[in-house]
């Protein structure tokens, strides 16, 4: 395996190859194009547009590789996918990392999402996180299948939480326990 922050060329199921590596500040224009392309589709991620390069640079500056990380998939010189983890900020949730992923059309369904998720989980384990969490629109069945195949389970549903193209859609909350087995203190 090696260092989770390594740069690595990975083969996809369709024969194409992508470099999977941590993001750099120099990626800002390309990560901005990636998120805006996925966002304009309206059906995969919460945001529809990052308003400009300064906002993107500010977002990128938060990734320190210790508590927060952004991995990018790069084809040629263009970011075509991004997956991030933000560690909890309070003492009660510092063991939890929230995950987000955005992969452009034309790069889905060929194994890139799985590669990116596996790398994020590898990084989280190496950094001592005990739990991974994410939220996914109920209409994104392919992503739900991927997450479940990686061991994520459904922990809750926020009914009619998002509005996509005029329709109310549930948001599914999913989690994966990475840490030692324990019992919950809940009644």
Image (cartoon, grey):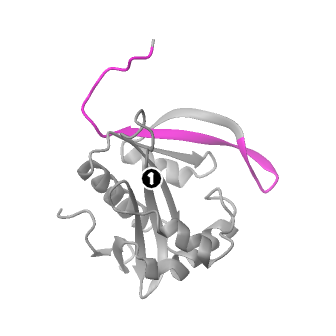
Q: Residue reaching furthest bottom? A: 76
164 part of magenta stretch: yes
Which residue is at a point 53% across and 64% down the rendered structure image? Answer: 102
Q: Is residue 116 magenta?
A: no
Residue under pointer 1: 86
Q: Nearer the viewer, residue 128 or 47?
A: 128
- At a point 55% along the width and 32% down the height, the residue shown is 156
What is the crowding at mark 1: few (fewer than 14 residues within 10 Å), some, or many (at least 20)? Answer: many
Question: Is residue 139 positioned above or below 30 on the image?
Answer: above
> Residue 112 falls in which quadrant of the image?
bottom left
Rendering coords of residue 114 (x, y %): 38, 59
Q: Position of residue 120 (x, y in %)?
A: 35, 57
Which quarter of the image is occupied by the N terminus?
bottom left
Q: Is residue 36 left or right of residue 128?
A: right
Question: Which residue of the protein is positioned furthest toward the top in this rendering?
Answer: 187
Reply above or below: 152 against 105.
above
Can residue 105 be seen here? The reply is no
Q: Is residue 171 visible?
A: yes
Q: Residue at x 40, y 36 (%)?
A: 91
> Dividing the picture into quarters, in which one does residue 85 lie?
bottom left
Percent from the top left, x then y, of residue 109?
Answer: 47, 65
Residue 5's quadrant in the figure?
bottom left
Element type at marker 1? strand
Left or right: 126 in relation to 114: left
Give the residues drawn in magenta, as a range.
161-186
Q: Residue furthest right?
A: 166
Of 146 and 88, the residue lying toward us: 88
Q: Position of residue 179 (x, y in %)?
A: 27, 37
Give me the residue at 34% from left, 72% from top.
21
């Amino acid at each position: 395996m090696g260092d989770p922050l390594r740069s690595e060329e990975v083969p996809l199921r369709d024969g194409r190859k992508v470099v999977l590596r941590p993001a750099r500040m120099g990626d800002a224009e390309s990560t901005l194009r990636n998120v805006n392309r996925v966002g304009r589709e309206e059906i995969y991620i919460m945001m529809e547009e990052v308003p400009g390069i300064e906002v993107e640079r500010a977002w990128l500056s938060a990734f320190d590789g210790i508590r927060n990380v952004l991995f990018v998939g790069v084809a040629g010189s263009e970011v075509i996918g991004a997956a991030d983890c933000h560690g909890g900020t309070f003492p009660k949730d510092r063991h939890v990392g929230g995950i987000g992923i955005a992969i452009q059309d034309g790069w889905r369904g060929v194994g890139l999402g799985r590669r990116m998720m596996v790398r994020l989980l590898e990084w989280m384990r190496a950094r001592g996180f005990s739990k991974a969490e994410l939220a996914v629109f109920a209409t994104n069945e392919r992503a739900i299948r991927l997450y479940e195949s990686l061991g994520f389970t459904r922990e809750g549903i926020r009914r009619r939480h998002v509005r996509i193209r005029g329709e109310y859609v549930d948001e599914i909350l999913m989690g994966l326990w990475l840490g030692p087995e324990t019992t919950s203190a809940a009644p």
